[in-house]
Amino acid sequence: MKRGGLRKRWLMNTVGVVCTLGLVCVLAVTAVFAAYYYSSMESDMRYRARTTTDFFADYINQSYNQYYQSCITYAQNFEEKDNLELQFINADGRIVASSYGTWAGPSPTTSDIADAMSTRDIVPYYGVNPQTGERILAVSSPMIYSNGEVIGVLRYVTSTHLMEQQVLRVGLIALLALVVITAVVLLTGNYYIKSILTSIGAITEKASRIAGGSYGIQIEKKNDDEIGDLAEAINEMSLKISENEKTQTEFISSLSHELRTPLTAITGWSETLLSGNDLDLDTRRGMKIIHKEAGRLTDMVLSLLDFTKIQGDRMTLNMELSDIRGEFEDTVFMYGSRLAQDGIKLNYIDNDEDIPEISCDPKRMRQVFLNILDNAAKHGGEGNRIDAWIRMEGDTVIVSIRDYGSGIPEDELPLVKKKFYKGSSKARGTGIGLAVCDEIVQMHGGTLELSNAEGGGTLVIVRVPASL
């Protein structure tokens, strides 16, 4: 059973959707937390900048030197210098004082400084520090002199490294939660899918057996659901097929037995009449036709009887040590004279290979050989030639019969051994001969194979083990 189909579809439809939605949720959660952290930090730094600017408003009226000294003092005493850098920048963009030390580093060139001076409002900056390449968040607040002149900016700067780590940590936690959820879905879903596939597998196996001829077998109904309803429907179908098959087999058996008596009488009286010399030419020709057709009908009846025995498991083999080569050669030579009347040459390919006696039912094996030769004449007789040979291959006896007709359509090859199957052939017959032969060969532990031969025609190969 192709279990990968349902499982693959479930994985794509269920797990795929869960993973997709989960990833969207992970990204959304990470984005929300990132926005929250950045917004909170920016709000905090804006508040600090505004508060500090308001505090320094009292010093704006001092002289430049006094103001400069106040900035340095404030910066030196700034308590949060481990997390934030406080910068005082003049109108030329140069650092006047920094919590990292006077004239700490080169003057910054980020856009927030000029924007704060031009807009006279607090301006944030989030991006890369051009001097260090580090990602930073900065907030610049303009410092306005009493005459309305912007004399510089007060600027808070912090690295976003810790904040980005925190955002990454949140994202990883959300991703881990998605992995756990997906694992739970996989485990529970796989158990559910497995229970479905197990039930379907059992149903498929029983349905295949029913299709193969095991009519009447029942599927155990384990659950009261759609699968249980399917099992019930197949069980009901199996019982009805079994009943119909039994009725059909009983009818065929009864009809075959009823036909044997009149056919025996027709065959016997036709032989009696033909043995006399008082028939004119036309009457004798008619009696020969009657005798031939009665014989053909008798063969069909015997095949039907064999078929009913197979259906009812009543066919038995009378096993004995037999010269399989002798049985095959006798059949070929006996049937060859009959085929010669129809213009078909039966060519026996002899060899010196030693073929030992094998344990088999010689009567049934003759029946197999005769039926295969008869099929070759019916379906491949237009080739006017049939080849037959027997050989050993290891511990197996191999009988091969090939005709030179049109062969069997490729799509019909797997079906020709099925009972009542005739395919596209227009030849007369019941369509059960090969089915009976196949059963007989299998009962001998062998195989019967049909294929299209190279160059045209059909090749039939019977393999029978030399010892059972």
Image (cartoon, grey):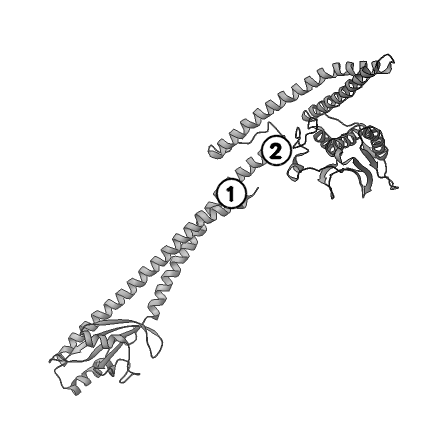
387, above or below 74, in the image = above
Would residue 80 be seen by someone viewing this image from the given angle?
no
Q: Residues within 10 Å of mark 1 (few under 14, many from 20)?
A: some
At 52% from the left and 41% from the top, the residue drawn is 197
At 84% from the left and 39% from the top, the residue drawn is 349
**Image position of 409 (left or right of 137):** right
What amino acid is at disc 1?
Lys
Q: At numbered mark 2, what does the secondary structure look like: helix, strand or loop?
A: helix
90 and 114: which is toward the camera? 114
The image quadrant where one finds the N terminus is top right
**Residue positioned most to the left:** 147
Would residue 390 be seen by someone viewing this image from the given angle?
yes
Q: Nearer the viewer, mark 1 or mark 2?
A: 2
Q: At numbered mark 1, what does the secondary structure look like: helix, strand or loop?
A: helix
Q: CA distance from mark 1 to mark 2?
A: 22 Å
Image quadrant in which you'd find residue 468: top right
What amino acid is at disc 2?
Arg
From the image, tell me which residue sits under label 1: 194
Q: Position of residue 203 (x, y in %)?
A: 55, 35
Q: Position of residue 383 (x, y in %)?
A: 76, 36
Q: Which mark is residue 417?
A: none
Q: Earlier in the sequence, mark 1 or mark 2?
A: 1
Q: Position of residue 31 (x, y in %)?
A: 33, 61
289 and 117: which is toward the camera? 289
Q: Position of residue 254 (x, y in %)?
A: 68, 17
222, above or below 9, in the image = above
From the image, tell me which residue sits under label 2: 209
